[in-house]
Image (cartoon, helix red, strand yellow):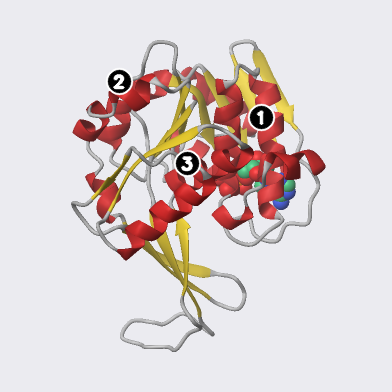
Amino acid sequence: DLLVVGSANADLVIGVERRPGAGETVLGSDLAVHPGGKGGNQAVAAARLGARTALLARVGDDAHGRLLLDAQRAAGVDTSGVLVGGAPTGVALITVDPSGDNSIVVSPGANSRLTPADLRDAQALLAASRVVSTQLEIPLETVVETVRNLAPGTRFVLNPSPPRELPREVLAACDPLIVNEHEARVVLGGAAGGGPEEWAAGLLELGPRSVVITLGAAGALVADASGTARVPSVAVEAVDTTGAGDAFTAALAWRLGRGEALAEAAGYAARVGAAAVTKEGAQASYPTAQEVDAL
Ligand code: ADP
């Protein structure tokens, strides 16, 4: 039902007393290796909710790639569309200091080798999906090609992260475009006065059929031609917000694919996002449908 086209990364995390300066070496904690990347996160989040989910991505023919594939399969994701080889698996090198501030270096690796041709070769997966969800940790040309290869009636969802200005062709396909506050500003080209209602109006003028702005603990806002509505958040004890946006997007895309209205689907997604912040980690924090219902 849901096809995620996107990135898969191994997150390599080391705790440090303080982050090193130029030319400096510091000793840190034991290494933790977590499956991540926005595409991988979205696919796992949806599958854990019970969505029939496939991932179209590229990993390296290496240990990190096998780790990521195992994590997807363990969550129940269809990995027949995950291509292997061409470059090392994407990696995020993360150091975290005691105050929780982190420094991150990302090596896109195989993610940058997911090409438009790979998309054209995936017609069966594209034809089998009601909704296709993408982000921007893969080449923009590949996202453009995704839009061009959507089967008739398939819904397209984009979270433009990391954010950049977008071609009209991509914007026009989004239903919805899902952004947080920072992403909204960048997609608007810096011309973002006012508050979320004004940003949503400005974004709609760029062409998407609908817009969702996520507002962290304040929930979200949905907007389309029929109007704008606030989506309340669920009050939870936030432990770690990593990956909350990916869980929100995955849940929203899945529910839209099942035919739910935008505000209703966003309400469910806000519950999923809230559940995800109550636990450490990204993929490790994602709830089952039962856990969402219990919230
Ligand atoms: P991103 O991680 O992309 O910046 P947000 O922080 O806006 O995205 O989080 C996505 C969604 O997750 C929010 O719209 C909200 O529904 C939920 N969420 C995030 N943080 C909290 C929180 N502290 N309490 C409750 N819900 C939250």
Query: Quick check: can you spot residue 264?
Result: yes
> Could you tell me how far apart the alpha carbons at marks 1 and 2 are, in whole angstroms?
26 Å
**Type of residue at label 1?**
Ala
Residue at mark 2: 149
Marks 3 and 2: which is nearer the front? 3
- The answer to whether mark 3 is within 8 Å of ligand 1 is no
Kindly state the secondary structure of the residue where label 1 is placed.
helix
Q: Tell which quarter ligand 1 is in.
A: top right
> Could you tell me how far apart the alpha carbons at marks 3 and 2 are, in whole angstroms?
22 Å
Residue at mark 3: 77
In the image, residue 145 lies at what x, y percent?
27, 26
> Could you tell me how far apart the alpha carbons at marks 3 and 1 are, in whole angstroms?
22 Å
Marks 3 and 1: which is nearer the front? 3
Kindly state the secondary structure of the residue where label 2 is placed.
loop
Left/right placement of residue 158 relative to residue 222 reads left
Query: Quick check: can you spot residue 180?
Result: no
The quarter of the picture where residue 281 lies is bottom right
Q: Assign the C terminus to one quadrant of the image.
A: top right
Question: Is 288 located above or below residue 239 in the figure?
Answer: above
Looking at marks 3 and 1 on the same chain, the residue that comes earlier in the sequence is marked by 3
Please tell me how crowded label 1 is: few (under 14), some (14-19), or many (20+) other residues with Cα within 10 Å: many
Left/right placement of residue 125 relative to residue 190 reads left
Residue at mark 1: 266
Nearest the eye: 277 or 183: 277
Residue in the image at 29% along x and 36% along y: 140
**Type of residue at label 3?**
Val
Nearest the eye: 207 or 121: 121
